[in-house]
Image (tube, rainbow, N blue to C red):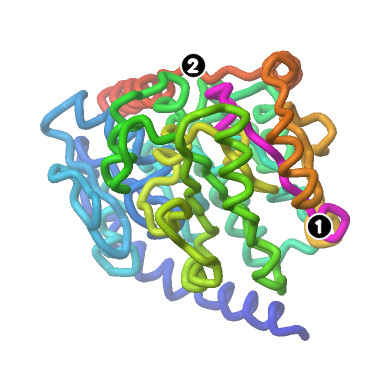
């Protein structure tokens, strides 16, 4: 028995006492106006649950909006914070009229007849295979995922591709709302307030152009691979597109504690701790990433992006890909020299045509109103189920 097998066994064994702890709270009455949110199993105010929560704040002043997290940083005044690992969190889940989350709920949580569950997921288009398409999925996670899918009432997607893919890999046969990604409304609608706010918070002038570099993580990889020749890249951007540029580095949360391996300066800024990745995407003028689903969020803006994959073949051995790089609308570069040359010769007209082709292939439907549409649906459901 491997260590992972042993951990799976322990987690499954804990199901019984945790369900016993949860069950008494299900005897308490459901609160019609209470809606519970969770983001990545306890992270702060972000992703699509944040966008939906913001929309609900404008729908009904009497709503009791509860955020399950580890701290209340950046929460609006009207949103209550509850420690996700507390007994109070069990009570809030058991007595809410609706749940909104972007990740799987704990396997001991049970949905009641009059509760409504919105699953937004956290990657509307996936580079990497997920859920049932994963090889060697841990038994604990498989049981948790199947249980969660059985509780879901609606799943949010942004394209026909995502609808078909999620339907196939989520063990889910319920309703799918193909209305866009709530967290991307600010990108679709080109929210200038967010554009300005990000610059102010980073001490940048309004006319400063931003390169956002946001690689995903690897297992057992030398951190040096995440370093880029930022000064050369900035020079190339200024030469090709004009203006004054800075680079924001946004590392994956797993790498956040080690972010000082990169040399920062006035023109190379560590934005790893910035609370909302979507706001950085909305404010950026150019994007470089590797296998992050953030690429599919950013290109909705139709701004230039590059796919930088110097370890593509090695990465294939680590994770099977759901989408092949050759169908991407942005140029693929595999080393620093290609990266610099591609920026210097970036073909805007060709890129825009490639975007049209890709969006058509995916059947994209980013409406820019997903958060409002889902908020309205939640209000209808909790009123009708009362």
- From the image, tell me which residue sits under label 1: 311
Name the quadrant containing residue 223: bottom right
Is 70 above or below relative to 367?
A: below
Q: Which residues are magenta?
A: 297-314
Q: Give the residue at x 63% y 34%.
A: 305
Front position in the image: 263 or 193: 263
The total number of labels drawn is 2
Name the secondary structure under disc 2: loop
Is 281 above or below relative to 320?
A: above
Q: Give the residue at x 39% y 20%.
A: 373
Q: Give the residue at x 59% y 42%.
A: 235
Name the quadrant containing residue 83: bottom left
Look at the image and tell me in which quarter the N terminus lies. Answer: bottom right
- From the image, tell me which residue sits under label 2: 367
Q: Is residue 155 magenta?
A: no
Front position in the image: 208 or 191: 208
Q: Earlier in the sequence, mark 2 or mark 1?
A: 1
Q: Position of residue 8 (x, y in %)?
A: 64, 75
């Amino acid at each position: 028995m491997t260590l992972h097998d042993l951990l799976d066994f322990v987690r499954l064994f804990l199901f019984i006492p945790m369900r016993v702890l949860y069950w008494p709270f299900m005897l308490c009455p459901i609160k019609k106006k209470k809606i519970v949110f969770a983001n990545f199993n306890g992270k702060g105010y972000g992703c699509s649950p944040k966008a939906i929560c913001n929309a609900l704040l404008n729908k009904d002043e009497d709503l009791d909006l509860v955020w399950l997290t580890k701290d209340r940083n950046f929460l609006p005044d009207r949103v209550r914070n509850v420690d996700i690992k507390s007994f109070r969190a069990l009570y809030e889940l058991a007595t809410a009229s609706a749940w909104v989350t972007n990740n799987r709920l704990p396997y001991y949580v049970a949905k009641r007849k009059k509760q409504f569950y919105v699953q937004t997921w956290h990657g509307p288009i996936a580079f990497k295979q997920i859920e049932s398409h994963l090889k060697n999925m841990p038994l604990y996670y498989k049981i948790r995922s199947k249980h969660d899918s059985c509780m879901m009432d609606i799943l949010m997607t942004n394209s026909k591709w995502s609808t078909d893919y999620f339907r196939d890999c989520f063990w889910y046969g319920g309703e799918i709302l193909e209305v866009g990604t709530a967290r991307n409304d600010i990108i679709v609608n080109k929210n200038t307030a967010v554009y300005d706010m990000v610059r102010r918070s980073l001490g940048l002038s309004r006319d400063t152009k931003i390169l956002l570099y946001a690689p995903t993580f690897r297992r057992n990889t030398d951190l040096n691979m995440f370093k880029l020749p930022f000064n050369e890249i900035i020079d190339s951007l200024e030469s090709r597109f004009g203006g004054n540029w800075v680079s924001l580095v946004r590392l994956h949360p797993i790498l956040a504690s080690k972010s000082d391996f990169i040399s920062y300066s006035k023109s190379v800024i560590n934005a790893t701790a910035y609370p909302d990745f979507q706001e950085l995407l909305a404010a950026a003028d150019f994007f470089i990433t590797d296998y992050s689903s953030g690429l599919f969020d950013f290109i909705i803006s139709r701004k230039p992006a590059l796919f930088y994959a110097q370890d593509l073949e090695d990465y294939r051995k680590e994770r099977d890909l759901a989408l092949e790089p050759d169908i991407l609308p942005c140029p693929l570069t595999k080393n620093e020299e290609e990266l610099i040359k591609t920026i210097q010769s970036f073909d805007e007209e060709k890129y825009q045509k490639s975007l049209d082709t890709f969006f058509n292939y995916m059947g994209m439907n980013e409406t820019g109103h997903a958060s409002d549409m889902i908020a309205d649906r939640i209000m209808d459901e909790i009123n009708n189920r009362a």
